[in-house]
Image: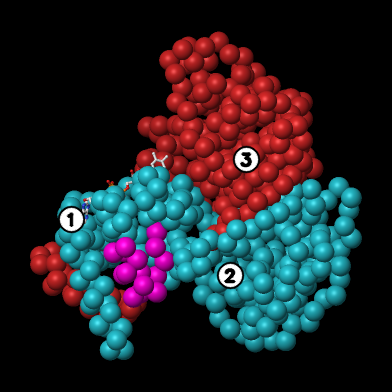
Amino acid sequence: MSNGVLVIFDQNQGQVRHVVPEILTVARELGVGAVTALTFGVRASETLETLGEYGAAQAVIWEHEPFTRYSSDGFADAIVELVPQVDPSVILFPASAWGKDLSPRVAELLGAGLVTDCLSLRTDANQRVIATRPIYAGKALAEVAVETPIQMFSMRPNINKAISHPVKPQVLDWTPSIGENSFRSVVVEVRQAESGTKEVTEADIVVSGGRGLKAPENFALLDQLAEVLGAAVGSSRPVADDGWVPHSYHIGQTGKVVSPTVYFAIGISGAIQHLAGISGSKYIVAINSDPEAPIFKVANYGVVGDLFQVVPALTEEIRKIKANS
Amino acid sequence: MKVLVLMKQVPDTETRIKIRPDAQGIVEDGIKWVINPYDEFAIEEALRIREKFSGEVVIVSLGPKRVEEAVRQSLAMGADRAVIVESEQMLEPYLVVQALAKVVQDEGYDLILTGKQAVDDDSAQVGPMLAARLELPQASIVIKLDIDEGAKKLRVERELEGATEVVELPFPAVITAQRGLNEPRYPTLPNIMKAKKKEVKRIPLASLNLNLPPRVRLIQLTPPPERPEPTVLTGDSAETAKKLAELLHEQAKVI
Ligand SMILES: Cc1cc2nc3c(=O)[nH]c(=O)nc-3n(C[C@H](O)[C@H](O)[C@H](O)COP(=O)(O)OP(=O)(O)OC[C@H]3O[C@@H](n4cnc5c(N)ncnc54)[C@H](O)[C@@H]3O)c2cc1C
Ligand SMILES: Nc1ncnc2c1ncn2[C@@H]1O[C@H](COP(=O)(O)O)[C@@H](O)[C@H]1O
């Protein structure tokens, strides 16, 4: 009978995203058998150490051509060929842009049910997986199970803790054949965002600004606060729409969904579409001059005040605390 | 060029969600229904492609009677005609794909556009899954779409976390639209009038003879966990800033 978990993810020059150790931990804690990790691309074998640290008993690494450039159809076909070799009962993906592109394609080719963007997984008495995922932009949670023999899930980043469990992974040396009608959709270029900008979906602390900042140059106040905190900077939608900040900052229902430990909403009113993107935050801190702003209804800590005075003062206070600890 | 756009009707993003007593769905009374926001980008892009390469834009939607309204709005934006697969029930993405695959195969197409995700189930599955079902190449979460002069090849940009990816793929293909792709137009009054007369074909779901077992089972819906009572600080800025920093350091222990 099938058992074990196959974890499939992307890597960049030997580096994996935070979500990879998180998913490997989720995979191991399911207790449905050994964890196999599959990754691709240039220098993929350099991820082996991380995979071992987080308990992957087996690793499959495709570093060679044509796996050096992502192709949704090419990779999906190759995975479908690999699956019988590993024979897993569960397949996990990150719910990143990459995982969201690939996992539904693989699910359809395998005839497997897929549940996307899961917050957590657990097993029932029959060793079947039950997933919890947000729907309606987090306004409700759904508990779901997959009815097919292979159960597929993608996991939202930054929710599950990565717990080290060192093993020495066996490398499974198995190469898929490449069909003629495969690798039709191919990545021809990847442009990395400016170095130094932290990715909001992975950050532990996010400092976010809205229209209350009044002008684009005032985002410098948030950059300074973010710097002392080691945080990423985000924004509400209107300020990204108006070009005050890049589109990649936009958080909410139609933007990025973040789940940091601390989310600072500064000069953000807390519209329902914005809240949809931040409900997974452990702590929400609101700084707003309007005591009636809806953001205070979801905040753990709120400051009613002028952000132009509060934010520089807060930056200084935090700098002092950091210096003393 | 013949472009099909899959359009789902969803609750307006302002909607407050109330879970039904049986925990198997939401209370639909009083909901304002709209075109899924990401599908608006898909429709707009299809219209721009038609403006450049001529051809036809066909809207395909699966859902209950009420979807007619969103379909008419899509036609008012400028789509040529529509096909509605009538289904009283909301189906999981896999079943939507099996139903719509049959319909689009009968229709024929050069390009299929969908939204990146539907803002009700938030699945983000239908586009790539349909591509696999139809054995087509795909690119999802697309923020820029270019077609070469000879209309032989697509070159698109995808939004990743911290990067932009450029992908090339041949026709026919499935593309899923992300915010940033374009600015959707508003229907003009003359177009709203014209839309009333445009052809809408109706296909009962049962006539597609699917009878497939679902792959995913909903156990229950629950409300999200309540957030705790806030600690709100007011008064002098310097003092509140200091107090906030202390609370974050000593109480929450997050800095
Ligand atoms: C389909 C749809 C999807 C949407 N998706 C998103 C989304 O994904 N993300 C998103 O953010 N929005 C989204 N919106 C927009 C959303 O409805 C709100 O319009 C938006 O979030 C408001 O942004 P804001 O809070 O920056 O601005 P405002 O609502 O204008 O709020 C500014 C706040 O700043 C405060 N302020 C002003 N001056 C100061 C000062 N000196 N000090 C302190 N506080 C000050 C004000 O009191 C106010 O609360 C969407 C809307 C629609 C219709
Ligand atoms: N019932 C439906 N009718 C038409 N299109 C749909 C339907 N469900 C999903 N889609 C399309 O698939 C996209 C992704 O939906 P989903 O996978 O449900 O998040 C949507 O943006 C639509 O373009």
Q: Mark 3 — on which chain does it sit?
A: B
Q: What is the three-letter code of the residue carrying label 3? A: Leu
Image coordinates for residue B210, horizontal then vertical, percent: 74, 34
Q: Which residues are magenta?
A: A220-234
Q: Is residue A303 left or right of residue A11?
A: left
Q: Residues within 10 Å of mark 1 (few under 14, many from 20)?
A: some
Query: According to the rendering, which colour does chain B have?
Result: red
Label 2, label 3: how far apart the Cα atoms are: 27 Å
> Would you say the beta carbon of the disc 2 residue lies within 8 angstroms of ligand 1?
no
Q: Residues within 10 Å of mark 3 (few under 14, many from 20)?
A: some
Quarter of the rendering occupied by the C terminus of chain A:
bottom left
Kindly state the secondary structure of the residue where label 2 is placed. loop
Quarter of the rendering occupied by the N terminus of chain A:
bottom right
Q: Which mark is residue B145?
A: 3
Above or below, comparing residue B41 to residue A112 in the picture: above
> Would you say the beta carbon of the disc 1 residue lies within 8 angstroms of ligand 1?
yes
Q: Mark 1 — on which chain does it sit?
A: A
Q: Is residue B72 left or right of residue B18?
A: right
Is A226 contained in the magenta span? yes
Residue at 47% across / 28% down in the picture? B185
Circle 2/circle 3 CB separation < 8 Å: no
Q: What is the three-letter code of the residue carrying label 2? A: Arg
Label 1, label 2: how far apart the Cα atoms are: 37 Å
Q: Point out the tag, 1 or 2, that comes first from the N-terminus.
A: 2
Q: Which mark is residue A17?
A: 2
Q: Residues within 10 Å of mark 2 (few under 14, many from 20)?
A: some
Q: Mark 2 — on which chain does it sit?
A: A
Image coordinates for residue A156, horizontal then vertical, percent: 54, 62
Residue at 86% across / 47% down in the picture? A181
Above or below, comparing residue B89 to residue A37 in the picture: above
